[in-house]
Structures are given as C-alpha cells and as structure tokens.
C-alpha cells in the first residue's frame, strides 16, 4: 500500500516488542513487585501485542487504541517512577533525570498519530476494506 506511514510500522514494531517483553518478563515482575503489578504487566503485554498487530493491518480503531495505550502506559510509568522515588534517594535521582524523556516519547507518539496524514491513511484504508466492498456488492 503506497500511503502506509513508516512511523506506524515503527510504532507497531515497538508495541509488539513491548508486548513480548512484558509477557517474557512476567516472572521478574511478580517476584519484584507482587501479583497486582505482574497482572498489570501481563494485561498491557497482551494489549500491546493486539494493538501492534492491528496497526500493521491498519485497522481503523488501532490508531485511537494506540493513542490510548501510549497514554495509559505514560501515566503508569510516571506513577511507578514516583513510587520508586519514594523508596530510595537513587531512585529519586533517576526520577529527576528520566521524567522528561518518559513524558516526551509518548507525547511525540500521540502527536504523530494525530497528524492529518496518518489519520487520512487509516481512513483511506477503512474505505478500501473488504467488508465495505462486500456490502456494496450485495
């Protein structure tokens, strides 16, 4: 497809890799932080895999799903970083230096997905979908 945005491919790859990483690292999450955080990690891993695969196939809902996923991951990342900063001074130093990149990357991704060219690519793919073509032919 000629109007397939390269940034969408990169984001889809990152989401799939994040999902695999979450699922593979679940035992570490459980042993370090407990069952609730491990549950969050496994759920976000599965969601990242689904959203990433859906971005590859240009599903109409995948763009909004990716924005929501990135936003939730950003908020949870800040909460976890803040929580760690309350535990030890070294975590507090890391929090101070990592908060800006931790916020900038998701914001850049959301701004990218909100661009008109990306939105148009998803809308044009939606209008070329097989389901609409099938419904028009009947």
Image (cartoon, rainbow, N blue to C red):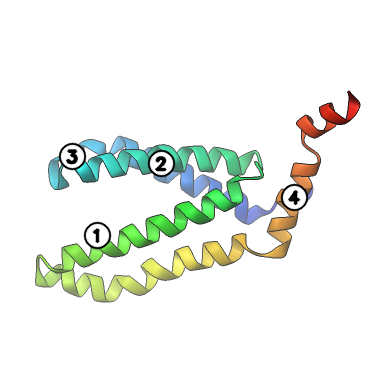
The residue that mark 3 highlights is 35
Measured along the vertical axis of the image, is residue 112 above or below residue 65?
A: below
- Distance in Å between CA atoms under marks 1 and 3: 15 Å
Secondary structure beneath disc 1? helix
Q: Nearer the viewer, residue 32 or 116?
A: 116
- Total marks shown come to 4
Q: Sequence order check: which comes first, mark 3 or mark 2? A: 2
The residue that mark 2 highlights is 19
Point 50% across, 37% down: residue: 50
Secondary structure beneath disc 4? helix
Q: Mark 2 packing: few (<14 Cα in 10 Å), some, or many (20+)?
A: many
- Distance in Å between CA atoms under marks 2 and 4: 26 Å
Kindly give the residue lying farthest to the right in the view shown. 137
The answer to whether residue 21 is visible is: no
Q: Sequence order check: which comes first, mark 1 or mark 3? A: 3
Q: Could you tell me if the residues under marks 4 and 3 are in contact, i.e. CB atoms within 8 Å?
A: no
Q: Which mark is residue 123?
A: 4
- Distance in Å between CA atoms under marks 4 and 3: 40 Å
Query: Residue 125 lies in what quarter of the image?
Result: top right
Query: Residue 94 lies in what quarter of the image?
Result: bottom left
Q: Sequence order check: which comes first, mark 4 or mark 3? A: 3
Q: Mark 3 packing: few (<14 Cα in 10 Å), some, or many (20+)?
A: some
Instruction: Residue 131 in the image: state x and y as whole percent.
Output: 76, 30
Q: Sequence order check: which comes first, mark 2 or mark 1? A: 2
Instruction: Residue 106 in the image: state x and y as whole percent.
Output: 46, 63
Instruction: Residue 84 in the image: state x and y as whole percent.
Output: 17, 63
Instruction: Residue 31 in the image: state x and y as whole percent.
Output: 13, 40
- Distance in Å between CA atoms under marks 3 and 2: 18 Å
């Amino acid at each position: 497809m000629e109007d397939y945005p390269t940034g969408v491919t990169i984001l889809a790859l990152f989401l799939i890799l994040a999902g695999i990483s979450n699922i593979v690292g679940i035992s570490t999450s459980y042993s370090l932080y407990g069952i609730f955080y491990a549950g969050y990690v496994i759920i976000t891993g599965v969601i990242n895999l689904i959203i990433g695969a859906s971005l590859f196939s240009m599903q109409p809902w995948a763009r909004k799903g990716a924005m929501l996923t990135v936003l939730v991951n950003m908020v949870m990342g800040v909460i976890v970083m803040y929580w760690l900063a309350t535990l030890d001074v070294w975590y507090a130093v890391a929090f101070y230096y990592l908060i800006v990149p931790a916020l900038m990357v998701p914001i850049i991704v959301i701004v990218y997905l909100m661009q008109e060219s990306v939105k148009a690519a998803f809308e044009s793919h939606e209008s070329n979908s097989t389901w609409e073509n099938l419904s028009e032919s009947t």
